[in-house]
Amino acid sequence: PDLTVKLSSDEVYGTPNEKAFIDEQYPTCPNISVDYGIMEKADNVYVSLGDFGWSDMGTWGALYDISPKDRNRNVTIKGQSLLYNCNDSIIVLPKDKLAVIDGLDGYLVAESDNVLLICKKDEEHTIRKYVNDARIKMGDEYV
């Protein structure tokens, strides 16, 4: 209910002010998942048993798991890479970017706009901290 009140505004949606309104309100919203924030409280939701694969695609690890791998279990998405002595890593680049990488084992290398992230693949839970640190130390220009 609090979130509904916060985001309710008949006068802003569908207008040039919509983006500014969302940019202002969204950061103040609680960080809760849809299943907890909405689905657990709904009394008109039904569940059906299914036998199918499912993965939470909200993580780099999940993207790695479903992506095709080279003979050293590396994944390259969008861009091109020449990998030497690299294993179990995921490389995500703009489609027109080439990366030449040597000696990584179990790393995430991801470039988006003007930011390059390089961290241990199994420590992706710290990315939120990195984003927060970048915002504080470098400003919103990079996040």
Image (tube, helix red, strand yellow):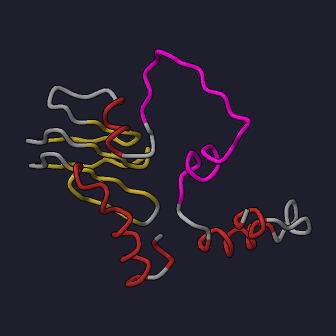
Left or right side of 69 for 9: right
Quadrant of the image occupied by residue 84: top left
Q: Nearer the viewer, residue 60 or 85?
A: 60
Q: Nearer the viewer, residue 106 or 49?
A: 49
Magenta span has 47?
A: yes
What residue lies at 76% left-to-right and 66% top-to-bottom?
A: 7
What is the span of residues highlighted in magenta in the rendered image? Answer: 32-55
Residue 85: x, y in percent? 8, 41
Left or right side of 21 for 73: left
Counting the numbered discs, the total is 0
- Give the answer, above or below, for where 21 lies relative to 53: below
What residue lies at 80% left-to-right and 66% top-to-bottom?
A: 18
- Give the answer, above or below, for where 102 lies relative to 56: below
Magenta span has 136?
A: no
Quadrant of the image occupied by residue 24: bottom right
Residue 109: x, y in percent? 28, 52
Residue 138: x, y in percent? 40, 82
What residue lies at 20% left-to-right and 50% top-to-bottom?
A: 107
Left or right side of 58 for 19: right
Quadrant of the image occupied by residue 5: bottom right
Residue 55: x, y in percent? 42, 32
Residue extending furthest toward the top? 51
Which quadrant, please, contains the N terminus? bottom right
What residue lies at 66% left-to-right and 28% top-to-bottom?
A: 46
Left or right side of 121 for 25: right
Q: Main secondary structure of the magenta part?
A: loop
Residue extending furthest toward the right? 11
